[in-house]
Each structure stands twice: as C-alpha cells, then as structure tokens.
Image (spheres, helix red, strand yellow):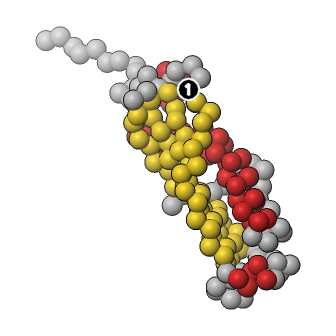
Amino acid sequence: MARARRSNETPQPRYEKLLSQLAPGYYSGHILLTSVQFRCSEEIIMYPSDPLENVEISWQYSFEKSRSGFNANVIINNTIQGDEVEHDSIDLEIGYKLHYESKMALPKAFYKRFAYDRVLPAVWPYFRYHALELYFRGGLKWVVLPFDPPEVAEQ
C-alpha cells in the first residue's frame, strides 16, 4: 500500500502568502463614505466647556466579494457619554467602503487580522477628519480624537 505524501503547506494559505498574492497596488486608495449618523443632545452643545469623560470607539467590519477582488465595509462608532446625566451623550457612526484588488478571495480565517492590520489604519484618518469636522460644526470644539487608531472594541 502506497503512503500518501503530506504537504508542509497548510490547507489555507498563510496570511503573509495571502498578502503576496494580492495584486500589485491591491488597495485602490478609494474610500467611499457610505453613511453618517450624528446624535447629540442640546445640553452638550449649550455647555461645550463641560468635559465628558467616557469616550468609547467601536467598529464593525464585513467583507464581500466583488468582480476584481473584495470590498471591506467598515462602520466606526464614537460615543462620548456624560458622567452625570444619561442623556448627555454624543453618538457618531460613520460607514465606509474600501475596495481591494485580489487574485483570490480573502479566507474567512483572515478577516479579523486583515481588518486590524490593513483596513482600520486606512480608514482611521478619514474617520478622524469627518468626526472632528462634524463636532466642530456642531459647536463641540473641545472633542479630541487620537492621530493613530486606538485599540477599539469590535462589536
């Protein structure tokens, strides 16, 4: 009876191999703003000097196949909660779509790592710009967001 030869290669390609198989210039550089929801109580705008201490940033992502690769859909949510009254809060949710050229589909096992390594750093500067612009126009000039993507909670 002949022995089956085992391959040293794992059934799914390793993450680094996946990145090497993405087409050159795989990230198109186009970020599509898909949705914006901004909720803020009037009390916060009327008293912008009162600092709000509890700042939370969370995000959701999903991937979908397209003709020439795949799309990453990202929703980043920034909530700033007041300490004293529950309705003293700001809730901002912005959605984006990024396109990646790829010769192969992104395996589900790599979704989370790819989202943290590639997608969040690509979309964070846009989120920061849009968020601060909305806060400023809403009279919330004191809101500050970090330059680099923080450790965010995934929803």
Residue placed furthest toward the bottom: 85
Asked where in the image residue 70 lies, by quadrant, the reply is top left
Depth check: 132 or 59 in front?
132
Q: Quadrant of residue 13?
A: top left
Against 26, residue 153 (above or below) is below
Identify which residue, 147 or 154, lies in the foreground: 147
Residue visible at 55% across and 26% down in the picture: 26
Q: Position of residue 129 (x, y in %)?
A: 74, 52
For the point 47% across and 26% down, the residue is: 102
Query: With respect to residue 130, does 7 lie above or below?
Result: above
Q: Secondary structure at mark 1?
A: loop
Q: Residue furthest left?
A: 1
**Does the rendering let one see residue 83?**
no
Residue 85 seen in the figure: yes
Q: Which quadrant holds the N terminus?
A: top left
Q: Which amino acid type corresponds to the residue marked 1 in the rendered image?
A: Tyr
Q: Which one is in front, 39 or 84?
A: 39
Residue position for label 1: 26
Q: Is residue 126 above or below residue 139?
A: above
Residue at left offset 62%, top offset 73%: 39
Label 1: few (<14), some (14–19) or many (≥20) C-alpha neighbours in 10 Å: some
> In this view, which residue lies farthest toward the top?
2
For this view, does 87 lie left or right of residue 23? right
14, above or below 145, in the image: above
